[in-house]
Amino acid sequence: MFKNIFIYFALNMFTFNYAIAQSNIVKVIVPYAPGGNVDNIARAYSKFVSEKFNENWMVENISGANGVIGASHVAKSKPDGKTLLFSADVHSMASLVIKSVPYDAINDFTPISLVAKAPLIFVVNPDSVKANNLTQLIDEIKPAPEKFNFAISGAGSSPQLGAEIFKSKTNLSLTTINYRGTGPAVIDLAGGHVNLMVVTPLAVMPLIKAGKLKALAVTSKTRFSPLQDIPTTAEAGMPGFELENAYGFWGPKGVPSSQILKISQQLKKVSEDPELQQRLIELGVNTAWVSPEDTASHITKEFKRNKEIYNKANIKPE
């Protein structure tokens, strides 16, 4: 009899502990393949939140269709704060380049917090481009624009936005070559198969330091701390050309305000950790916690601006 009581008690304790463990699991969906910037930042934050708050934040990669499949998974999830999307703010651009996106990037998600940001870097192939700043680059391109082209890492990506902003501000007609991912685009840029690219710092910092690529500017108001010697776009001759990637967390529509506040405050707390800040600098980004309200305002503002850029460039969903 005592044996049966012990087994009963043990089974109930196991069930109880399992239930507690399950209640502490938060799935962080990254809508891209492992190893990229979005994935690395998500894993850094998930690790620090898990350790600091005794929770289990598990990163799951659900990639495909330029981030749409993973984002769609989150949009359809239960709004209990246990399934989150981690992505760059350009995830809202899917509907601008892809037909029949199965969600509204603004209205079907709950903004929680942006947590990191980084400018892009305007880089060129040093063998095919002589210019050392953006003013010189424009002068170099004007006589023969057909000889120059932009590499972009996919429709709706920040490199495509950067290329279109440059083309719009200069009224130069330049070809854009679409790659499936940043890696192949950067390889071809370093190899001289394409000339120009606006890209995330992590993808090109080693190549800049090795002299394989030449950096003309960072697309921010202030210089980028890991690469202080690179001027801003304003300093390089093109004021008003500003473009930063902001990375953050979203939940599905309907997450209770108490859960939003809890998660946001957890993210704020770990953003202040010097160890995490250093880890993100190594990834080419800076910590930059933003409240849920300001995150929502940022996303709406950026979507409006990006839509105007794409409409002007006559880029349609395909």
Image (spheres, rainbow, N blue to C red):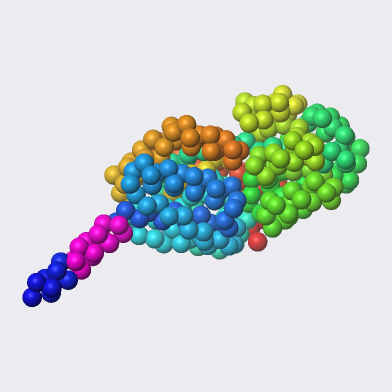
Tell me: residue 291, above or below residue 110: above
Tell me: residue 303, above or below residue 290: below
Q: Residue at x 25, y 59 (%)?
A: 17
Magenta portion: prevailing SS class: helix
From the top left corner, tell me how far across and down residue 308 is, in percent: 62, 43
From the top left corner, tell me how far across and down residue 282 is, in percent: 59, 38
Q: Residue furthest left?
A: 1
Where the N terminus falls, by quadrant? Answer: bottom left
Q: Residue at x 75, y 26 (%)?
A: 237
Most foreground residue, 113 or 310: 113
Figure quadrant of residue 131: top right
Q: Residue at x 42, y 43 (%)?
A: 48
Res. 34 visible in picture: yes
- The residue range painted magenta reads 10-22
Res. 107 visible in picture: no
Instruction: Check residue 11 for magenta coloring.
Output: yes
Figure quadrant of residue 273: top left
